[in-house]
Amino acid sequence: MNFAVYAKNLKKFVDASGRTHRSISKELGIGETAFSRVIRGIRPPTYKQFVRLSEILGVKMEAFFEER
């Protein structure tokens, strides 16, 4: 998995959603600090979090790994 591409795309999708990090992290069931680490590429999400992010942001899972 190319985590740098994933983190870059995740940030774009989160920004485009207009949602706050707080609201997304709450839906994921993790703290804002943990979510911030995922967005900055410091730590990968769990598979469950990855699937949930896809649902929350309305993005297909494979879109996170597409070079843009």
Image (cartoon, rainbow, N blue to C red):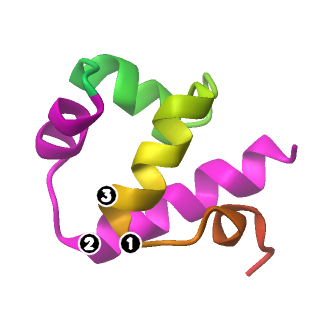
Give the numbered dot on residue 17: 2
Can you say whether 7 is above or below 47 in the image? below
Asked if labels 1 and 2 touch by Cβ distance under 8 angstroms, the answer is: yes
Locate residue 25, reporting x and y percent: 24, 34
Q: Which residues are magenta?
A: 1-28
Dot 2 or dot 1: first in sequence order is: 2
Can you say whether 19 is above or below 20 in the image? below
Give the numbered dot on residue 56: 3
Can you say whether 28 is above or below 56 in the image? above
Asked if labels 3 and 1 touch by Cβ distance under 8 angstroms, the answer is: yes
- Residue 66: say if magenta: no
| Farthest residue, direction right | 1
Cα distance between the residues tagged 1 and 3: 6 Å
For the residues carrying marks 2 and 1, which lies nearer the camera in this image? 1
Local crowd size for mark 1, using a 10 Å CA cut-off: few (<14), some (14–19), many (≥20): few
Callout 2: SS:
helix
Cα distance between the residues tagged 2 and 3: 9 Å
Question: Can you say which quadrant of the picture contains the C terminus?
Answer: bottom right
Residue in the image at 58% along x and 71% along y: 60
Identify residue for label 1: 58
Asked if labels 3 and 2 touch by Cβ distance under 8 angstroms, the answer is: yes
The image quadrant of residue 33 is: top left
- Residue 12: say if magenta: yes
